Amino acid sequence: MTMLRQRLIDLHSDEHTTSCVADATRFHARQTFNSTYMYVFAYHSLTSVYPYWMGAPRSSELDYLFGMPFINESHWMPWHGIQRRQVFTYSDEEISNYTMQLFVNFARYG
C-alpha cells in the first residue's frame, strides 16, 4: 500500500468519525463540570474479516468488550441472527480480557 493511499484513508476516517467525536467531547467538557474521557481502540485481529490496511473498524471493540472471543461454537445461534464474524485467537482473548478490565476499572475508580 502506498503512503498516499493510507493518508487518504486516514483523512476520510478522521473527517467522518474522529472529528465528530472530538467535537462532541469538547462540547461536553465545556458544558459540564465532570471529567470527560476518550479512548482509541486500534487493535486489528490477525483473523479479522476486514483487510489489515483498514485498521480497526468503528465499534470493533464491542466484540472484545462483551467477551465474544470466549464464546464457543455451541453458543452461536444463527437462527436468532447471532453469527460468528471471525475466528478468534488466544491473542484476541487476551485483548478481550484487557479491554473488559479497562472498562471495569474505569467504572469502579473513574
Image (cartoon, helix red, strand yellow):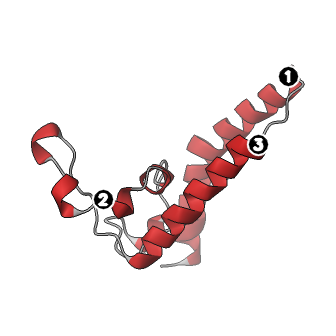
Mark 1, secondary structure of its residue? loop
Q: In which quarter of the image is residue 26?
A: top right
Identify the image quadrant of the C terminus. Answer: top right
Q: Mark 3 points at which residue?
A: 37
Q: Is residue 16 left or right of residue 51?
A: right
Which x, y percent locates residue 43? 54, 67
Residue 44 pos. (x, y %): 48, 69
Residue located beneath label 1 in the image: 32
Q: What residue type is labelled 2?
A: Ile
Mark nearer the viewer, 2 or 3: 2
Badge 1 local density, few (<14 within 10 Å), some, or many (20+)? few
Q: Residues within 10 Å of mark 2 (few under 14, many from 20)?
A: few
- Sequence order check, earlier mark of 1 and 2: 1
> Picture coordinates of residue 25 (x, y %)?
75, 34
Name the foreground residue: 4 vs 23: 23
Q: Which residue has dot 2 on it?
A: 71
| Disc 1 to disc 2, C-alpha distance | 39 Å
Q: Is residue 74 visible?
A: yes
Report, in whole angstroms, how far the alpha carbon at label 2 lies from the one at label 3. Answer: 30 Å
Q: Which residue is at a point 15% across and 47% down the rendered structure image?
A: 77
Who's the residue at 46% across and 64% down the image?
Answer: 54
Q: Residues within 10 Å of mark 3 (few under 14, many from 20)?
A: few
The reply to whether callout 3 and callout 1 are in contact (CB within 8 Å) is: no
Q: Which of the two labelled residues, at mark 2 and mark 3, occupies the earlier sequence position?
A: 3
Looking at the image, the residue that sits furthest to the left is 79
> Residue placed at 34% from the left, 70% from the top?
88
Give the residue type at disc 1: Thr
Q: Which amino acid does label 3 sit on?
A: Tyr
